[in-house]
Amino acid sequence: MHMHEINFTQATPVDGYGPGFFRVGGVVIRGGVLVTATGADPWAGLDAQGPLLALASEIDVLFVGTGAEVAHIPPALREQLETAGIGVEIMSSPAACRTYNVLLSEGRRVALAALAV
């Protein structure tokens, strides 16, 4: 097995997370977070669909982290995202962070919207 160092040239990975926060690009963001290849911003949660829909031309897949455990998102939100052409993957926030980082390192057009654990 060959090990390769992950290189995030000109992209913003999730560095870490903990109770109530995420660390992205060395910056701590308290509460929910919305992360794209170009940066991160606080995210108000599942009721804040505007910032997610604004990514439609920039991403193919959005990973939604629902906190410590996997939970359903509102069906209307999923429908809005899919109608906008955004694929949606729901998972716990830790799994969403890891998956986002892996696909980001491959140069994929992905974003992460995650609720804090």
Image (cartoon, rainbow, N blue to C red):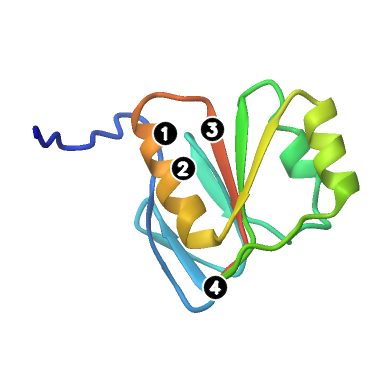
Q: Is residue 23 left or right of residue 60?
A: left
Which residue matches tag 4?
Answer: 117
Q: Neighbour class for label 3 at 10 Å: few (<14), some, many (≥20)?
A: many
Query: Which label number is shown at residue 79?
Result: none
Of marks 2 and 4, which one's residue comes earlier in the chain? 2
Comes first in the chain, label 4 or label 1 = 1
Looking at the rendering, in which quadrant would you find the C terminus?
bottom right
Give the residue type that dot 3 points to.
Val
Provide the residue designation for mark 2.
100
Question: Residue 114, how many percent across, how many down?
Answer: 60, 57
Q: Secondary structure at mark 1?
A: helix
Rounded to the nearest angstrom, the CA distance separating label 1 from label 3 is 7 Å
Say which amino acid is labelled 1: Leu
Per the model, the C-alpha gap separating discs 2 and 3 is 7 Å
Q: Residue at x 34, y 32 (%)?
A: 105
Residue pictured at 42% horizontal, 33% vertical: 103
Which one is nearer the viewer's eye here, 52 or 28?
52
Q: Is residue 6 found left or right of 1 in the rendered image?
A: right
Q: Are marks 2 and 3 in contact (CB under 8 Å)?
A: yes
Residue 107 coordinates in the image, percent (x, y): 40, 24
Residue pushed farthest bottom?
19
Q: Quadrant of residue 15?
A: bottom left
Report whether 47 appears left or right of 109.
Answer: right
The residue under label 3 is 110
- Up-down relation of residue 41 to residue 28 (above or below): above
Residue behind mark 1: 103
